[in-house]
């Protein structure tokens, strides 16, 4: 290509390049202008935002301090806020460097946490104490710088000015807020009323606190920054109150704590009352004779009384471990304290199925292998679970069986009685009646059972005994509950068919009344006959007594004449010896006859109860000597010996000396007739604790065994003597003193009669004046 062309092309290219450059430059200037305008707008917006930020920061007592990695500081916030912070934290004038003041205060309060923020970016919260109040410090990391935000603790003010603050102030429970230093920052009306102050300032001046224990709970929540609860009792206004203290750290970690005191007095009193009721309930159940076991919803043993442990004899320690219902059943089965069943698994499942029941099951009975019978009651427990009640009814069943048997025996016994018997209960209804009752009134047993009460039964019986007063009186004894009316009564009446009916009532211990009727027609006839015979007997006895008296008088007169003339004949000197012997025999026979008459009279007097003893202090030795002297000549005249033995120390006895001597004289006379030559008659007195025994022994022929049982009978002919009442009179005289007589004899070896005389004779047979003296001296 030519140079010209080359030049042309170069020129053209340069021109084109210039044009292109011009166009590009124009376009670049336009873009730069637009960008400059955008930058100017962004700058204006940024300046406006900075102004808004500065205005927002200046509107609050809020300041921020940035610590850059190169060790520089930047402050954000209103100068006035920095002045207040500087002045309150250091007390210096406005010339002090605020950043250094804040850094020194923060390092003093949270030095390690500040270093962690700068080195590792770990956030923290702290509280600075100033002269005018507390400042919250928040440490955060952003864009490689450590930022500190300082703000006055104004939680209360903001809350109080809001609806939430009004709500908290009207909250009925005492509520208060403490700052990081534990000082009272705010309290609602309920707290002020509880503390009895009008304002928070007054509470601060008096340094009041709700309770020391509550303060400790609040302090613990502030220290740990965790929710805390506690329970406190306080005393005020004359009563104790229970409080549930709830402490909640304020959001943001500024150190403030919100505290609530919830009044739990009523709940605690209710809980305490419930506890006492439960304890009383448990104590009451422990005093029950029936065994009680309560299983909770978990089917574990929740309670058992003492009777339950005793009934099944289970280890108390094992029961205290709260076994399940199934475990208890297994333990009882191992010890053979459950009914023996074929399918134990099915039986156990049925027992445990009751936990789903809504109503009490019918009573059940368990027959245990040891012979006991238990009544089992199952019912749902109001708090869930099951309540079981066990009663040992073994004795009850036995008593019921015995009672039923006794009732049957009573019915059978009443049916065997001849008297018409009916038993009416305290309600007036007929309980029992025997067959004789039906027969006596001519009423069928079914009719009586249908009648039921006393009035209906009386209506059926009035046809036989139409006496309204009788039935009214009986009804009063049956139906009247007054104890004065329930007294035994009796009477008689006549029936419509002429029978004599005797009736009587007897109150029974259970409140029932027994009414008995009997036909005494024959008895009354017999009594009249017996009365007539008794009167005739009395007349006969009187006649006999008069006859005996008359005969004895008529006999004594000629006997006295016979004795007198026989003695006169014996004194005649010219009387032949044989005639003299005859006269002596007549005299002896007459005297024996007179003695027999006296014995008969004494027996008659004793039989009539007319003989009276003349009691006195009697020396036994004197009586024995007196009786011995009366027969000594006769005994020694037969060639026998009389021996009298009486201890010198024997105490006197209370007796009739004449009658005792009479009895001894007859026994000695009887022995004198029995003893032979060379024999011995012994009169022996022996002392005993409550009596004196007097023995009259002889060595005569004795008494045959078949006669010994009748030796004291009267008017029986004996081999030792003849007919008479001598020994009978001896026995009667001794018994009149309250003693008794006996005989000991072996045929061919003699006989012994023993008189048992009490130390003091009974006064029933004594003269009235002597009995009076006895009572007075006693």
Image (tube, rainbow, N blue to C red):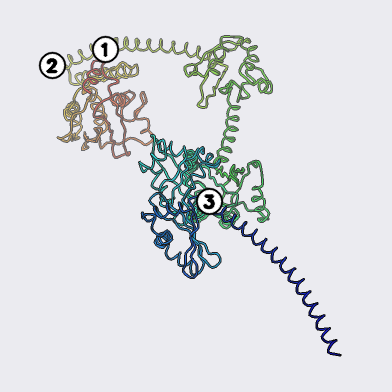
Query: Could you say which disc has been placed on residue 312 in the image?
Result: 3
Per the image, label 3 sits on a secondary structure element best described as: helix
- Residue 376 position within the rendered picture, expressed as x and y whole percent measured from the top left: 60, 44
Cα separation between marks 2 and 1: 28 Å
Disc number placed over residue 556 in the picture, else none? 1
Quarter that holds the C terminus: top left
Residue 653 visible in image = yes
Please tell me the numbered disc located at residue 128: none
Q: Is residue 750 left or right of residue 474?
A: left
CA separation, marks 2 and 3? 115 Å
Q: Which sits earlier in the primary sequence, circle 2 or circle 3?
A: 3
Which of the two discs, 2 and 1, sits closer to the camera? 1
Would residue 621 appear left or right of 191 to someone viewing this image?
left
Question: Which residue does the image show at 35% across and 12% down from the upper left?
Answer: 545
Judge the density around disc 2: few (<14), some (14-19), many (≥20) Cα neighbours within 10 Å: few
The answer to which of 181 and 460 lies nearer the viewer is 181
User: In front of the other: label 2 or label 3?
Assistant: 3
Name the N-terminal-most of marks 2 and 1. Answer: 1
The residue carrying pointer 3 sits among few (fewer than 14), some (14 to 19) or many (20 or more) residues within 10 Å by Cα, namely few
Q: Are marks 1 and 3 in contact (CB under 8 Å)?
A: no
Label annotation for residue 573: 2
Query: What x and y, as percent, mark residue 216?
Result: 41, 51
* Residue 245 position in % (x across, y down): 46, 46
Residue at position x 43%, y 66% from top? Answer: 112
Please give the name of the residue rendered at 83% of the width and 83% of the height, measured from the top-left corner. 9
Secondary structure state at the residue bearing disc 1: helix
Judged by depth in the image, the label closer to the viewer, 1 or 3, is: 3
| Residue 197 x, y percent position in the rendering | 40, 36
């Amino acid at each position: 290509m030519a140079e010209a062309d080359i030049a042309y092309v170069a020129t053209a290219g340069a021109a084109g390049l210039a044009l292109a450059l011009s166009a590009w430059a124009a376009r670049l200037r336009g873009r730069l202008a637009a960008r400059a305008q955008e930058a100017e707008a962004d700058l204006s917006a940024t300046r406006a935002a900075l102004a808004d930020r500065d205005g927002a920061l200046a509107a609050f007592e809020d300041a921020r301090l940035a610590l850059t990695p190169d060790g520089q500081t930047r402050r954000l916030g209103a100068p006035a806020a920095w002045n207040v912070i500087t002045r309150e934290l250091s007390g210096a004038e406005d010339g002090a460097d605020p950043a250094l003041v804040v850094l020194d205060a923060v390092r003093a309060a949270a030095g390690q946490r500040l270093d962690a923020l700068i080195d590792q970016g770990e956030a923290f919260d702290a509280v600075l104490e100033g002269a005018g109040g507390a400042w919250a410090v928040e440490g955060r990391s952003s864009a490689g710088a450590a930022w500190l935000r300082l703000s006055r603790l104004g939680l209360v003010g903001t809350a109080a000015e809001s609806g939430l603050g009004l709500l908290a102030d009207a909250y009925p429970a005492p509520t208060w807020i403490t700052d990081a230093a534990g000082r009272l920052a705010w309290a609602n009306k309920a707290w002020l009323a509880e503390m009895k102050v009008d304002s928070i300032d007054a509470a601060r001046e008096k340094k009041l606190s709700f309770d020391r224990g509550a303060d400790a709970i609040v302090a613990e929540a502030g220290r740990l920054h965790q929710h805390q609860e506690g329970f406190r009792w306080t005393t005020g206004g004359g009563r104790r109150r229970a409080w549930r203290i709830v402490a909640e750290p304020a959001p943001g970690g500024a150190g403030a704590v919100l505290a609530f005191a919830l009044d739990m007095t009523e709940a605690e009193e209710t809980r305490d009352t419930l506890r006492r009721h439960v304890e009383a309930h448990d104590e009451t159940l422990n005093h029950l004779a029936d065994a009680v076991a309560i299983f909770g919803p978990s089917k574990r043993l929740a309670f058992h009384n003492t009777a339950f442990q005793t009934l099944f004899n289970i280890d108390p320690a094992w029961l205290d471990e709260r076994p399940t219902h199934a475990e208890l059943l297994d333990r009882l089965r191992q010890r053979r304290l459950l009914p023996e069943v074929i399918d134990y698994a099915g039986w156990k499942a049925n027992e445990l199925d009751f936990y789903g029941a809504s109503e009490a099951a019918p009573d059940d009975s368990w027959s245990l292998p040891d012979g006991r019978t238990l009544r089992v009651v199952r019912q749902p427990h109001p708090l869930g679970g099951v309540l079981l009640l066990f009663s040992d009814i073994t004795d009850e069943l036995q008593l019921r069986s015995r009672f039923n048997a006794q009732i049957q025996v009573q019915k059978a016994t009443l049916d065997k009685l001849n008297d018409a018997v009916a038993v009416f209960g305290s309600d007036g209804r007929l309980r029992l009646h025997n067959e004789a009752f039906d027969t006596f009134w001519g009423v069928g047993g079914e009719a009586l059972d249908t009648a039921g009460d006393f009035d209906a039964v009386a209506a059926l019986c009035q046809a036989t005994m139409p006496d309204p007063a009788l039935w009214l009186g009986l009804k009063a004894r049956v139906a009247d509950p007054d104890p004065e009316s329930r007294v035994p009564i009796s009477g008689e009446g006549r029936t419509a068919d002429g029978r004599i009916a005797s009736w009587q009532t007897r109150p029974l211990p259970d409140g029932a009344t027994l009414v008995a009727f009997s036909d005494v027609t024959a008895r009354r006839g017999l009594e009249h006959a017996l009365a007539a015979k008794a009167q005739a007997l009395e007349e006969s006895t009187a006649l006999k007594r008069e006859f005996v008296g008359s005969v004895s008088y008529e006999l004594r007169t000629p006997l006295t004449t016979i004795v007198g003339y026989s003695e006169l004949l014996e004194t005649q000197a010219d009387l032949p010896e044989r005639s003299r012997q005859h006269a002596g025999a007549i005299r002896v026979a007459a005297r024996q006859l007179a003695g027999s008459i006296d014995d008969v009279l004494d027996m008659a007097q004793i039989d009539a109860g007319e003989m009276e003893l003349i009691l006195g202090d009697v020396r036994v030795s004197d009586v024995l000597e007196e009786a011995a002297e009366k027969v000594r000549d006769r005994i020694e005249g037969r060639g026998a010996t009389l021996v009298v033995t009486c201890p010198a120390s024997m105490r006197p006895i209370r007796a009739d000396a004449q009658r005792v001597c009479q009895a001894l004289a007859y026994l000695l006379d009887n022995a004198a007739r029995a003893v032979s030559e060379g024999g011995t008659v012994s009169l022996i007195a022996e002392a005993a604790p409550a009596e004196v025994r007097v023995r009259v022994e002889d060595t005569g022929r004795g008494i045959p065994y078949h006669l010994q049982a009748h030796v004291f009978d009267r008017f029986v002919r004996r081999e030792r003597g003849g007919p008479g009442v001598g020994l009978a009179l001896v026995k009667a005289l001794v018994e009149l003193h309250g003693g008794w007589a006996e005989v000991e004899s072996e045929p061919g070896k003699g006989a012994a009669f023993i008189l048992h005389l009490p130390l003091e004779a009974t006064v029933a047979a004594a003269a009235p004046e002597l009995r009076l003296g006895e009572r007075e001296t006693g």
